[in-house]
Image (tube, rainbow, N blue to C red):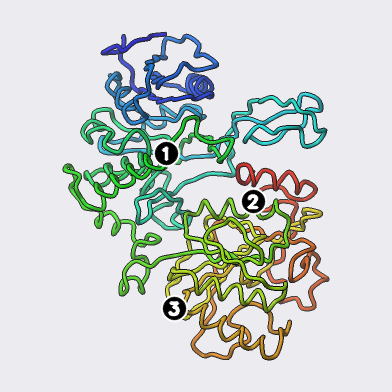
Amino acid sequence: MKRGIPLLNSHKYDLSVIIPARNEIFLSNTINDILKNKRGNTEVIAILDGYWPEPGIQDHPDVTLIHHPVSIGQRAATNEGARISNAKFIMKADAHCAFDEGFDIKLMQDCEYDWTVIPRMYNLHAFDWECKKCGHRVYQGPKPDKCEKCKHPELERKMVWKPRKSRKSDSMRFDTNMKFAYWGSYTKRAEAKPKIAPLLCAIGACWFLHRDRFWDLDGLDEGHGSWGQMGVEIACKSWLSGGKHLINKKTWFSHMFRTGKGFGFPYKISGKQVNKARKHSQKLWKGNTWPKAKHDLDWLLTKFHPIPEWHDDKQSKKTGKLKRGIVYYTDNQAEERFFIAGRKILESMDLPIISVSQHPIDFGKNYAMDLDRSNLSMFRQILTGLQKSDADIVYLCEHDVLYHESHFNLIPEKENIFYYNQNRWAVDTKTGQAVHYLTKCPSHLVAFKSTLIDYYTKRLAMVEKDGFKSKVGYAPPRGIESNSWKVKTYMSEQPNVDLRHDKNLSGVGRFKKEDFSAEWARKGWKESDTVPYWGKTKGCFEEFLRGISKGGAK
């Protein structure tokens, strides 16, 4: 093991994997995984940024440790690793990742000089918490106070360290604030289909390129501060310099995502740090101030057009950028654990949220209405939320639906159309039974706000006058005579999960074919004990829901 700050390694490597690490308890796992799976002349350079790892790192001739008693920051640490390397290629990796066998050979075989390459990304199942008494295990997250099965207070971390192949990310972008976002719908486009395909952006956890090319791009810009916007910086530099930023699906890395309180970053990151990085990023790319750029940002946006939020439909070309938002409505009747799982997912969508409830809740910008539980109240709540929202396009979201991020990739093209996502699975929360059939639910609806306000204003007046007629139902534009409104349906890349329970306003729902009076009403019928992407539900709904609350679908 080499320590200190050597000017050059003792021998030439083809690839240096640079790992900036600060208070990372999984650094040894990551290094060991690289050593296990590398098949080429590859080394590891780990920058111990203000700490000594525990557990320690085993001596190995292909591992160099650089220790800083005081943290210098992720960007500076990555730059230092690149300066120490004398390899042909460098790869930056987070200190909580696993890798494909032969990842290094596969990446080096397909990387031209002006390319930046991102291996396919899976979520990493790093560990479980195991009860020392009964052996019951729960998915990674904050350490439980006690075993949920036998109530024993002692649990220990058990390493798993396996990729979750059901959770892959092949396409990413940035929004109009230059903030990273997932982009599931892009994978359906022809240009995204090849094994090596254009990629607008990535998360910054793992990227690969020629070492000299890294310095041609001026390394990482430490003007951002120590942390934040790395993936956006790498992507923009790669494209705007005249090169390419690509995904290589022939190999992969698996990244552990921390999921919030009790299982967040291992060091404090202030809002000021994040804002500084974001503002610097906006100045560079939206302001077109990077001196080495051969193209401006509009060139890149045109290359990937249409991009959600970036002038991505006919209407926006006339009116400029359209703002999207969520209107979330609840009668506060579902179980709290349903609320927690659903809200956590919606918060991760990075869309402004207006919540309208019958009792105050801490979610988005909340408006509590003193109403009795009824269909009329639901219509009033939806209309209130629409009136309070400043969005142009609104996704109606209900408290007991688990939404997949791809649901929000649909951007309406025309103002007079109601768009329904029909990739919906209903799950009985008592049995876990899952069924799918084609239906149009308001909780899976997106449309222009102006159209929704027009409809719900008229619908509310009708119900106030004549009462709610179940034959008319809930789904716009039913109940209102209009020749101008139309309906379209779509199927998101992955399904939403509609939780059906004994407190649903419309009842638990139908889980048998014989529950339908007409065959057309259950078109597309499927029964399963597993919801695609989300995982198994039948007979293990409690475990399924815990997994969603603590880390997403399993």
Q: Kindly indicate the quadrant of the structure image that contains residue 440.
A: bottom right
Q: Secondary structure at mark 2?
A: helix
Q: Position of residue 94 (x, y in %)?
A: 44, 30
Rounded to the nearest angstrom, the CA distance separating label 1 from label 3 is: 40 Å
Q: Which residue has dot 2 on it?
A: 341
Classed neighbour count for the residue bearing mark 3: other residues with Cα under 10 Å, few (<14), some (14–19), many (≥20): some
Please tell me whether mark 2 or mark 1 is closer to you in this view.
Answer: 1
Amino acid type, callout 3:
Glu
Residue 251 is left or right of residue 291, and the answer is right
Looking at the image, residue 199 lies above or below residue 306: above
Q: Quadrant of the C terminus?
A: top right
Residue at image position (55%, 82%) is: 455
Which of marks 1 and 2 precedes in the sequence?
1
Residue at image position (63%, 77%) is: 379
Please tell me whether mark 2 or mark 3 is closer to you in this view.
Answer: 2
Residue 291 is left or right of residue 249, and the answer is left
Amino acid type, callout 1:
Ser
Q: Position of residue 390 (x, y in %)?
A: 44, 69
Residue 77 is left or right of residue 405, and the answer is left
Which of marks 3 and 1 precedes in the sequence?
1
Residue 1 is left or right of residue 75, and the answer is right
Classed neighbour count for the residue bearing mark 1: other residues with Cα under 10 Å, few (<14), some (14–19), many (≥20): few
Q: Which residue has dot 3 on it?
A: 415
Q: Nearer the viewer, residue 54 or 481?
A: 54
Rounded to the nearest angstrom, the CA distance separating label 2 from label 1 is: 26 Å
Residue at image position (81%, 54%) is: 431
Amino acid type, callout 2:
Ala
Looking at the rendered structure, which numbered label has been put on residue 270? 1
Q: Position of residue 225 (x, y in %)?
A: 31, 35
Q: Kindly indicate the quadrant of the structure image that contains residue 330.
A: bottom right
